[in-house]
Image (cartoon, grey):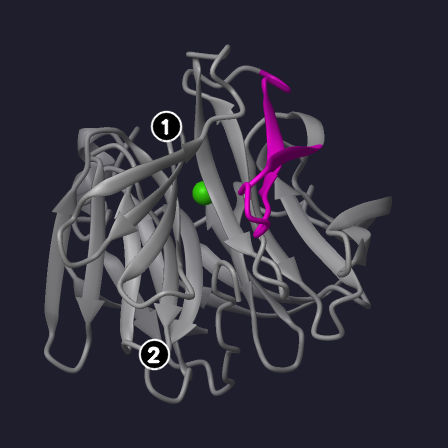
């Protein structure tokens, strides 16, 4: 089994949300709990950190230069990379102070899908939302009664959306209408009920294979969502593996984020690099991440 290696030993509490910016050749990722946005340049081996005023669930690159879009504890925001300043877009859960945004990504039309969860857990307390690219930047609810909204990926032909609500331990597939962003016909694509831990974040490669992070499972595994079969596993020297994304100039490096939260002293001793950013080259390439507004 291939093993991922540490690239940044940040000891993050909840490293998450890696996404490669193919225009700037940097990896964005976050530490949700430390309110940190990381901008990692692997060529210069430099990791710039922007501290924000609230937890960041996830980040996507924008169409405009130096503009990112964040799903934060209290809604959607633009972030100017040069100044580090945020600009509020909207909050669909103003009435839910116990919730925060978690994972999310842009669809092939540049709409930002991101979901929420209860800060203390809470079964079915969250939802999945869509920030649209219209002039009013409208926000709509896509799915209700979500517990821990996590990985989201669109098939290469853009006709299927894959989505993870972690406690369910499955990847759901939905028919996807690219012209409207609407979904339907939910079914199980991948069954992870016999797997260790729970499915967390995910990304896809150029073949349409899904690479899924295992929280409490210490690995990333590649699954074919069409056959529902597992193809291979990557060992990660940290139990809480949160998300992954292909990056590098040729998109052939898998970047993997991990968390340090909830580990005992003995576990921290056994996995001293937990919370770090890891990489592996599994011999396949990823695809460019979609930008907001693209
Ligand atoms: Ca996650």
Looking at the image, tell me whether mark 1 or mark 2 is earlier in sequence order: 2
- Please provide percent x and percent y for residue 289: 48, 69
Q: Is residue 223 visible?
A: yes
Point 40% across, 61% down: residue: 62
- Mark 1 lies on a secondary structure that is loop
When asked about the image quadrant of residue 219, the answer is bottom left
Q: Residue furthest right?
A: 185
Q: Which residue is mark 1?
A: 73
Q: Secondary structure at mark 2?
A: loop
> Is residue 233 one of those drawn in magenta?
no
Q: Nearer the viewer, residue 154 or 173?
A: 154
Most foreground residue, 194 or 6: 6
**Other-residue count near label 1 (Cα within 10 Å), few / some / many at <14 / 14–19 / ≥20:** many
For label 2, count other residues whose C-alpha is less than 10 Å away and answer few (under 14), some (14-19) or many (20+).
few
Question: Residue 122 vs residue 64: left or right?
Answer: right
Label 2 sits on residue: 23
Instruction: Kindly identify the residue that appears in the image at 42 percent across and 82 percent down.
Output: 251
Which quarter holds ligand 1?
Answer: top left
Asked if ligand 1 lies within 8 A of label 2, the reply is: no
Q: Which mark is residue 122?
A: none
Q: Quadrant of residue 149?
A: top right
Which of labels 1 and 2 is toward the front?
2
Q: Give x and y (percent) for residue 222.
A: 59, 67
Q: Is residue 186 visible?
A: no
Q: Which residues are magenta?
A: 123-142
Please report the residue visible at 30 percent of the width from the left and 39 percent of the height from the top: 87
């Amino acid at each position: 089994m291939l093993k991922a290696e540490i690239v940044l030993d940040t000891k993050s509490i909840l490293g998450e949300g890696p996404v490669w910016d193919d225009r700037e050749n940097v990896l964005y990722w976050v530490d949700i709990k430390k309110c940190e946005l990381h901008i990692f340049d692997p060529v210069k081996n430099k990791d710039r950190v922007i501290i924000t005023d609230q937890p960041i669930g996830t980040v996507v690159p924008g169409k405009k230069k130096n503009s990112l879009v964040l799903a934060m504890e209290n809604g959607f925001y633009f972030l100017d990379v040069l100044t580090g300043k945020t600009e509020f877009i909207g909050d669909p859960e103003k009435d839910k102070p116990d919730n925060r945004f978690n994972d999310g990504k842009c669809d092939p039309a540049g709409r930002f899908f991101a979901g929420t969860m209860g800060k203390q857990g809470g079964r079915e307390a969250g939802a999945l939302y869509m920030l649209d690219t219209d002039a009013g930047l409208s926000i709509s609810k896509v799915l209700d009664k979500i517990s821990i909204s996590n990985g989201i990926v669109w098939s290469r032909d853009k006709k299927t959306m894959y989505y993870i609500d972690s406690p369910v331990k499955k990847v759901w597939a939905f028919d996807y209408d690219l012209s409207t962003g609407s979904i339907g016909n939910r079914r199980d694509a991948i069954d992870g009920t016999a797997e260790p831990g729970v499915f967390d974040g995910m990304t896809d490669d150029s073949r349409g294979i899904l690479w899924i992070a295992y929280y409490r499972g210490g690995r990333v595994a590649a699954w074919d969502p069409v056959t529902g079969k597992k193809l291979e596993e990557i060992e990660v020297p940290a139990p809480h593996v949160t998300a992954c994304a292909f990056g590098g100039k040729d998109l052939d490096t898998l970047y993997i984020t991990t968390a340090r939260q909830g580990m005992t002293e003995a576990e921290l001793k056994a996995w001293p690099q937990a919370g770090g950013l890891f990489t592996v080259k599994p011999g396949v390439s990823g695809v460019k991440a979609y930008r907001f507004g693209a």
